[in-house]
Image (cartoon, helix red, strand yellow):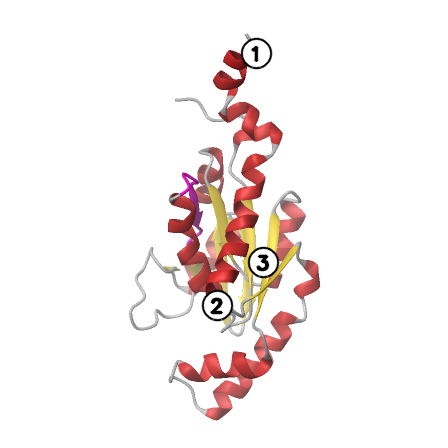
């Protein structure tokens, strides 16, 4: 089986949000929503040096690696992007991302603004979307709802969220996650629209178009 032409490749999407913005829930719900429409999409599994949280599985939520391996991978150019965030390292594997795109699968990069800047420099055609909470009060409520952090930690996480949100205007699209289903519909629309662009459709439906014009 040959690789699809460039016009039929998958699209690269950058999805960023502050902690508590709902990014993880939305992207994980998006994959089956798109699959029901016959649309192949996948969430890139990042590499990180942080320890797994309760319930997280290696290779599913993250690829958990130690500092030495992460640095070695970065030196060998194995990352599409990588960043040092609040004392931990995160990176997106290059080879797997390219493999999925070549197969016609849309790839979501669940990354922060630092990683987004790196990806845009290398892949200007990547589409980017930032997800905002409906208010600061709601963001704090969501963070407290996890029941894992004390007041000092919540204050620190709110400050980190504000720092992340200050980069919202660097993105192509903006979604306010006030209502989950509405936000999911809006995110799905961003993924479905590029599949209707003429160049890609000409490859996917070449046989149909040829038969209609004969």
Local packing at callout 1 (Cα closer than 10 Å; few below 14, some 14-19, many 20+) is few
Residue on which the image places disc 3:
115
| Residue 46, x across and y down, in percent | 44, 56
Residue situated in front as seen by the camera: 47 or 193: 193
| Residue 212, x across and y down, in percent | 53, 14
Residue at the far bottom in the pictured view: 151
Residue on which the image places disc 1:
213
Q: Over which residues does the magenta segment extend?
A: 37-45
110 left or right of 120 in image: left
Q: In which quarter of the image is the C terminus?
A: top right
Disc 3 secondary structure class = helix
In this rendering, the answer to whether 108 lies above or below 206 is: below
| Label 2–label 3 contact, CB within 8 A | no
Residue on which the image places disc 2:
22
Q: How far apart are marks 2 and 1 (CA)?
A: 47 Å
Closer to the eye: label 2 or 1? 1
Closer to the eye: label 2 or 3? 2
Local packing at callout 3 (Cα closer than 10 Å; few below 14, some 14-19, many 20+) is many
Residue situated in front as seen by the camera: 104 or 115: 104
Instruction: Name the N-terminal-most of marks 1 and 3.
Output: 3
Q: Which residue is drawn at 52% across and 33% down?
A: 9
Magenta stretch: helix, strand or loop mostly: loop
Residue at the far right in the pictured view: 169
């Amino acid at each position: 089986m040959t690789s699809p032409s460039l016009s039929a490749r998958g699209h690269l999407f950058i999805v960023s949000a502050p902690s508590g913005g709902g990014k993880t829930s939305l992207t994980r719900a998006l994959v089956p929503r798109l699959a029901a429409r016959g649309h192949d999409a996948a969430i890139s599994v990042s590499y990180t040096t942080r320890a797994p949280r309760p319930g997280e599985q290696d290779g599913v939520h993250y690829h958990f690696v130690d500092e030495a391996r992460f640095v070695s991978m970065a030196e060998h150019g194995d990352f599409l992007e990588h960043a040092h965030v609040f004392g931990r390292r995160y990176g997106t594997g290059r080879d797997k991302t390219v493999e999925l795109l070549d197969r016609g699968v849309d790839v979501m990069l669940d990354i922060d603004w630092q990683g987004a800047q790196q990806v845009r420099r290398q892949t200007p055609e990547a589409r980017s979307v930032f997800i905002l909470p409906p208010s600061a009060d709601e963001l704090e409520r969501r963070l407290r709802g996890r029941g894992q952090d004390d007041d000092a930690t919540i204050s620190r996480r709110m400050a980190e969220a504000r720092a992340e949100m200050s980069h919202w205007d660097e993105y192509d699209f903006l979604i306010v996650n006030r209502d989950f289903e509405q936000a999911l519909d809006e995110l799905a629309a961003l993924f479905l629209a590029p599949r209707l662009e003429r160049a890609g459709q000409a490859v996917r439906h070449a046989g149909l178009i040829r038969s209609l014009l004969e």
